[in-house]
Amino acid sequence: MPEVRGRLSQGRDLSGLTWLRVGGPADWFFMPADTDDLAAFLAALDPAIPVFPMGVGSNLIVRDGGIRGVVIRLGRPFMEISVEGDTVTAGAAALDAHVARRAAEAGRDLTFLRTIPGSIGGAVRMNAGCYGTYVADRLHEVEAVTRGGERVTLPAAELGLGYRRSALPEGWVLTRARFTAPPGDPEALAALMEDQLARRDATQPTKERTAGSTFRNPAGHSSTGRADDTHELKAWSLIDAAGLRGYRHGGAQMSEKHPNFLLNAGGATATELEALGELVRERVFQSSGLRLEWEVLRVGDPLPRDTDDPAP
């Protein structure tokens, strides 16, 4: 491995770093000291070694066998947030909620980020959105380090942002994002965010071990939060109609409160969580003819098995 100024360790267990608390070890785990450290490391790293940038693990299932190659996680040096005029600049490791609050204090509206779990890097990569607004609607440009160690700045238009997706190349590490945020009254923005939090907590299992919404909505957009919002092509509605609200497999469960949330209800393995998700996809297809697509990212290798596990 190349020499670094940050923290580089071998065999780091990843289960404690994911919100679902599952997953095996990473071959190597790197927390760079700064962008220069990250760029130098990637430039010197054997191109054949895979790289996986990991945020705060809020939208992630790491399989029980762990991740081959290098997992890169950005820490405190990448958490800065600043507001200048209508531009909000945030490090990729800054939490979405913190960015929303800091922007609101400065009279800038990025309130849609307040209830989105995770960090800015993941929000950009997945074009996160809530209540009808997406990262793509506010993003101006990003800074990243390529797999080969080159530092680049890309306008938002070059990221291929769509519903829960981007075209950012594999192995690239986002380091910073700049948003253009419309003005707003700080007190009104704070009140709006409090209302959003109350609505989220009333409808989602926020106190459980979960990775957020498990499947993308076949409708092709997130909930708008408006009174005229329809539910026919929402993932939760299809799961509910298939009779899977509260369904359990081992320690994995579909939430009773919101059936599009996959829970670690106690001692679940990544294998159980993924198996339950696949069962949900199959049952929903049988029920509705629609094939749900995973929103939660699943990475790594399963543990080898002597025999096949029984179907859930």
Image: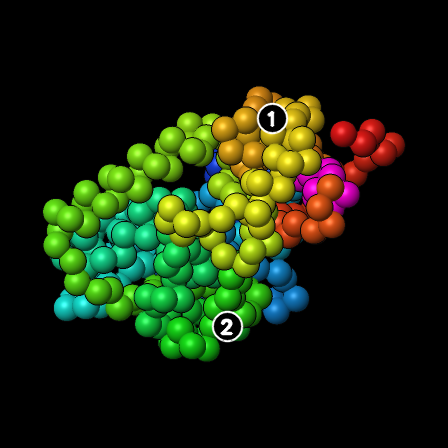
Q: Residue 246: which disc?
A: 1
How packed is label 1: few (under 14 Cα within 10 Å), some, or many (20 or more)?
Answer: some
Q: What residue is rendered at 73% in x and 41% in y?
A: 287
| Relative to 221, residue 17 above or below | above
Quadrant in which the C terminus appears = top right
Q: On screen, 169 above or below 243?
A: below
Q: In this view, does 141 lie above or below 219?
A: below
Circle 2 residues within 10 Å: few <14, some 14–19, many ≥20: few
Which is more toward the observer, 178 or 305? Answer: 178
Q: Looking at this view, name the residue that lies furthest to the front.
A: 228
Q: Position of residue 155 (x, y in %)?
A: 38, 77
In the foreground, 154 or 258:
258
Give the Cα distance between marks 2 and 1.
36 Å
The picture places residue 70, in percent across and down from the top left corner, at 56, 54
Magenta stretch: includes residue 19? no
Q: Do the residues labelled 2 and 1 touch (CB within 8 Å)?
A: no
User: Where's residue 143, x and y in %?
Assistant: 37, 70
Q: Residue at x 38, y 46 (%)?
A: 227
Majority secondary structure in the magenta region: helix
Q: Is residue 31 visible?
A: no
Q: How many labels does the image show?
A: 2
For residue 245, side relative to residue 309 (left or right): left
Is residue 279 on the magenta stretch? yes
Query: Could you tell me residue 13's position as x and y percent?
Result: 56, 37
Q: Is mark 2 on a helix, strand or loop?
A: loop
Q: Which mark is residue 160?
A: 2
| Residue 181: quarter of image | bottom left
